[in-house]
Amino acid sequence: MVLAAGRGERMRPLTDSTPKPLLQVRGQPLMQWPMQALARGGFVRQLVNTAWLGEQIPAHFGERVRWPGLPEVRVAYSHEGRDFGHALETAGGIVRALPQLDEVFWIVAGDVFAPDFVFTQEVVQRFAASGKQAHLWLVPNPAHNLKGDFGLAVDGSVLNLPAGDAGRCYTFSTIALYRKSFFTRADAPAPLGNPQGVAVALAPMLRAAMDRGEVSGEAYLGAWTDVGTPERLAQLNT
């Protein structure tokens, strides 16, 4: 699943007429980079959620897309804006799309640039055998998030540390593997398929799962940019 429903407020005025994931980075839409990387790894069934100016995304990619040297990708859509009039936040959007996803699935953000990240079937198989509910890729804290998000233990457990803790050395890259069961617990904030369109943030669910010892992770040291401002976009295109 490629997350592409956000408004991109900090990117205005660029996002007043173009969804943030369709902004151009090095000659192609930003979200096309992770879509192609997934295809390169053999993940050819992809789902995209939409909201703000969401009709532009299927108009651009359609339901089948093929890039030179890559297998054909079938693209499905979860139209949060059309169905509910607003985006459902990260977890709410995932739960909405959950009936269309496999038991283990990738989540990537359509507004993050990580051109060298490699998606492999072997990683999926290893995660499926691990018993964990989520596996996150973490990057060293960038300049715009020096206080960090999480810690990482030597055994690969991701740690929910308090704000200001010196161990919060990592920022969540947004790239992750999840099990469906992560989102279908008895205490889940929305039922399967999210029929009421409840907006649900992901971070509290992740932190609770970390406290239960259910989240593993690893550091990613490749190129990575959260394209959150026009300045960062311009830097990538320089």
Image: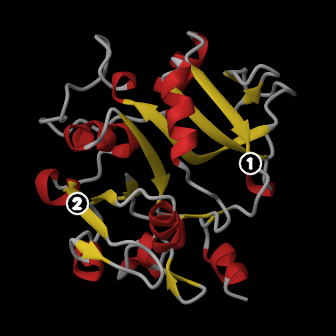
Q: Do the residues under discs 1 and 2 have CB atoms within 8 angstroms? A: no
Q: Is residue 176 above or below residue 4?
A: above
Q: Residue furthest right?
A: 166
- Asked if residue 149 shows in the view, the reply is no
Per the image, the residue denoted by label 1 is 220
Residue 117 at what x, y percent from top left?
Answer: 64, 59
Residues packed near mark 1 inside 10 Å, few (<14), some (14 to 19) or many (20 plus): some
Name the spot of residue 58 as percent of width and height, x first: 24, 73
Q: Amino acid at mark 2?
A: Ala
Image quadrant where residue 226 sits = bottom right
Q: Image height check: is 47 above or below 150?
A: below
Q: Secondary structure at mark 2?
A: strand
Is 95 rendered above or below residue 49? above
Which of the image's four quarters has the C terminus?
Answer: bottom right
* Residue carrying label 2: 76
- Scheme of image coloration: secondary structure
Look at label 1 and name its amino acid.
Tyr
Q: Foreground residue, 172 or 103?
A: 103
Viewer-nearest residue: 41 or 214: 41
Q: Residue at x 21, y 71 (%)?
A: 63
Query: Residue at left 76%, top 28%?
Result: 151
Relative horizontal placement of residue 18, taking residue 198 as reference (left or right): right
Q: Earlier in the sequence, mark 1 or mark 2?
A: 2
Q: Which structural element holds mark 1?
A: loop
Residue 38: give x, y in percent of width and height: 48, 60
- Going 51% across and 46% down the picture, which residue do you hit? 121
